[in-house]
Image (spheres, helix red, strand yellow):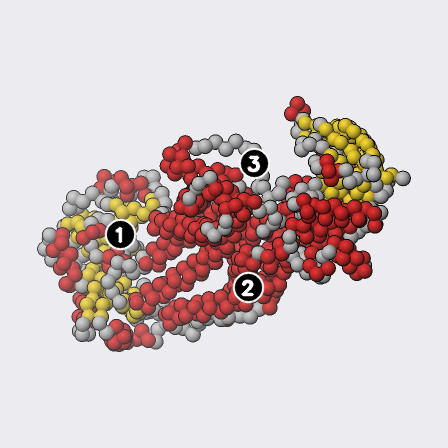
Amino acid sequence: MNSITATLAKAQLKQNRKRTVITMIGIVLSVAMLTAVCGFAASGIDAMRNLVGDDYIAAYQSMFVSMAAVLGAIIMAASVVVISGAFRISASERMRQFGILKSVGATKRQITKTMLYEAVYLCAISIPTGIVIGLLIQWLGASIGDLLLAPMNKLINNGLSMHMRFVFSWQSILIAILLSLVTVMLSAWLPARKAAKIPAIEAIKLTREIKVRKTKLRTNRLIQAIFGFEGTLAAKAIKRSRRSYRAMVTALTISIVLFLVCGNLNTELTMAMNQLYANIDANSLTTFSSVSSSSPYYNQPLDADAAQQLTDTLLAYPDTTIYGVGVDGGYALDVASADLTDTMLKTLDEGQTVVGAALVIADQAHYEALCKAAGVAVGSNILINTAQKTISNKDTEFQPLHFSGQTLTLSNNGTSVDITLDAQLISAQVPQEVFYAAYEDIIIVVPDCAASQYYWFGNSADLAGFLTYAENTMAAYFPLAEDSSAYVYGVTDITAITDMTRSLTKLVTIFLYGFVIMLTLIGLTSVIAAISANVRLRAREFAALRSVGMTQGGLRRMLALESVMSSLKALLYGLPLGSIAMYFTYRSVVIQSEFQFVYPWATLIEVAAGVFLITLITTQYAAAKLRGGSIIETIRSNEGV
Amino acid sequence: MSILKVQGLTKDYGKGDAAVAALNDVSFSVDKGEFVAIVGASGSGKSTLMHLIGGVERPTKGKVFVDDMDIFSLNESRLSIFRRRNIGLVYQFYNLIPTLTAEENIMLPYLLDGRKPDPKKLNEILDLLGLANRRDHLPGELSGGQQQRVSIGRALINDPAVILADEPTGNLDSHKSRAIMDLLKLSNRQFHQTLLLITHDEKIALQADRILTIEDGRILRDEAVRA
């Protein structure tokens, strides 16, 4: 290890301590993420193994492994871009040094080796640190995950429960170490190979002059007009040193894309989770169902009177409101095609005029409210003339029928019933509870029917007490249900469900954003490295500008404009790419839940602001570092940093 | 016995009509132990000649033999190894590695070979250069003259067949220049080193055994200096 290549590598790391630290942070973060991803896969497999047992674990195992593989690949790709950027800066700073080494007889391999040794030294410290941090993240994530799984376990309450534990798996740590090594060595090798190719003469001929590429740099009139002379200089600097800006723009672009996709996924997920009971103001749901065929005793529907009796009993509990709604559904309704609206006809097969229909009853008070809303006497039949369907991938609300006070014939299994419509209501006038109960296209509220299903949405100040009370009420009314295996009645704590959905959403959000934020941090290290190296490399240029009279303020403005322009560039790539990526993830992930594509404008604005902030802060910081240097000394300095 | 032979050396920069001949069919040879000064105005092609002999650049046409080895017949890594064992380079701007100590910079050609020089030899050179008490200093901690002495030490350490010095005193004041020239002459005498010195300074050139004058990429004069 005592070879000259190793010595040079060590010296370089010591020489440029700040960049070494930044690079190390980058490596530590990516190792931590790889470790955490491998660890989470292990935790996930463990959780599923406890749930489903050894016999069924194989499928889940491959699911977790492939998920980890996808995430790992993303992390590795991002890390290589970023870490190799840092190494490229290190190489470009030492071009002259490599030239000198070559002129005294160093071979290409020796030049490559010094860079690789640099990587080895960095790994020696960063990988163990990264592993430890990764395990910490895994432990923290597993703990939070377990905490958030608790509401679900409480709800399921059937002996089966899912727990996330911290799993120390040496296999996954080994994999993480190997992947990290590959990532870092590849990151060092890519620029090293290039640096070694530079002929000695190129590097030593010029003292420390940065070679300006000969491409024609046209002055953009627009930039000149908007940003002034400093703006023109900034634009030229960016065009000229495109390479050093590229890593930064790439890193920023990737972050933008990930944040947008993440923001969109999160919005869709929250919407999906919230839709369950979103518009119903209730904290408990008591249900009755006679659909079960295995329940001979109660295979009979509830009529309005029986239901009302139960409603009144439930209402007797203090500080409680109840919305009771029952359904006699599954009817087929053959209507004259003239009675059906065009939209309704479009959703049916060609020539079809049979639509699904349901009769609905409500508790006395709410039935009367509906009649009053429709402006008819109690005892009327009211058509709820609103249907919801997904038409060409879009949620659509529409009127299914032309209402004319007609009489409809509903048939079900050979029996049929004639209903004369007295009035109609549309969705805005109808409580969500009705739509929750019945999902048919045509819903008719009637004074009485044989409800095969009945729902009591309860809102009670003392929820726990009411749940017990409702349970007892139902058990007293259906005494034999206990013995039958059938599901006759049920009492559900809705808040528990919303709690569960909320914590599941939180769980996914934490993991999603955690992932993206970590990746962004890795990218950030490269942005900081790129900007500060760039400013340092151009110290002479800045000194020259100051010697011809540019003020410190002008210099700062020029750097600020450079950062604004490169941010704009990153946004220019990132926003369209992110939007496309967002749409594709939406298409592949969210399509089943029948949600419309929602553009996360808030995320977009946050992302844009973040990008500008990051680049501005780093350039201003770097510029502040330059303030001290004497003009003449910087101009005249020939020797290396 | 000639240690360095240059045959028909030509170097064009650019291509086609835009081609500029920096060096045009230059031939000469140098005997072992000879001290040759190459003079010429800036842009005459003298630095190009030096880079070609040093093997850091490849010619358009022509050959260079160092110790009877046709250096451009070697591939790049073989040439690198040949260079570190047989050619010593001294530049105007010292070209030291800023992160290595004076001693390490001097030993560099050996270190690249994975070897350590004989400590006696190293001490002899450090004494000769007057750097014995500066051996652990980094280049940044040394004066210009001291840095140039380190680079001379680096050129001397491996007993090269030829030492090539490109304006070694160009960046130094007259007092330090004289000290560096004395040092180069001393090494030429004491170690019987072959020395090629590029300069635009007539006075310095006159200290050599022989002066090659270059103009527009050709040898204009080749004359011995009378002692």
User: Relative to A95, does residue A49 appear above or below in the rendering?
Assistant: below
Left or right placement of residue B50 versus residue A421 in this view: right
The answer, for residue B95, to whether it is visible in the render is: yes
**Cα distance between the residues tagged 2 and 3:** 39 Å
The mark nearer the N terminus, 1 or 2, is: 2
**Cα distance between the residues tagged 1 and 2:** 61 Å
The answer, for residue A580, to whether it is visible in the render is: no
Q: Which residue is mark 3?
A: A213
Q: Which corner quadrant of the image does residue B27 belong to?
A: top right
Q: In the drawing, what numbered circle is on residue B128?
A: none
The mark nearer the N terminus, 3 or 1, is: 3
Relative to the observer, which residue lies in front, A359 or B11?
Answer: B11
For the point 58% across and 51% down, which residue is it? A641
For the point 50% across and 68% down, which residue is it? A136
Pointer 3 local density, CA inside 10 Å: few below 14, some 14–19, many at least 20: few
Q: For numbered disc 2, what is the local secondary structure?
A: helix
* Badge 3: chain ID: A
Pointer 2 local density, CA inside 10 Å: few below 14, some 14–19, many at least 20: many
Say if labels 3 and 1 share a chain. Answer: yes
Q: Which residue is mark 1?
A: A357
Q: Callout 3, which amino acid?
A: Arg
The mark nearer the N terminus, 2 or 3, is: 2
Assign the N terminus of chain A to one quadrant of the image.
bottom right
* Badge 1: chain ID: A
**Rendering coords of residue A161 (x, y %):** 44, 71
**Rendering coords of residue A631 (x, y %):** 50, 46
Q: In the drawing, what numbered circle is on residue A130?
A: 2
Q: Callout 1, which amino acid?
A: Ala
For the point 34% across and 66% down, which residue is it? A499
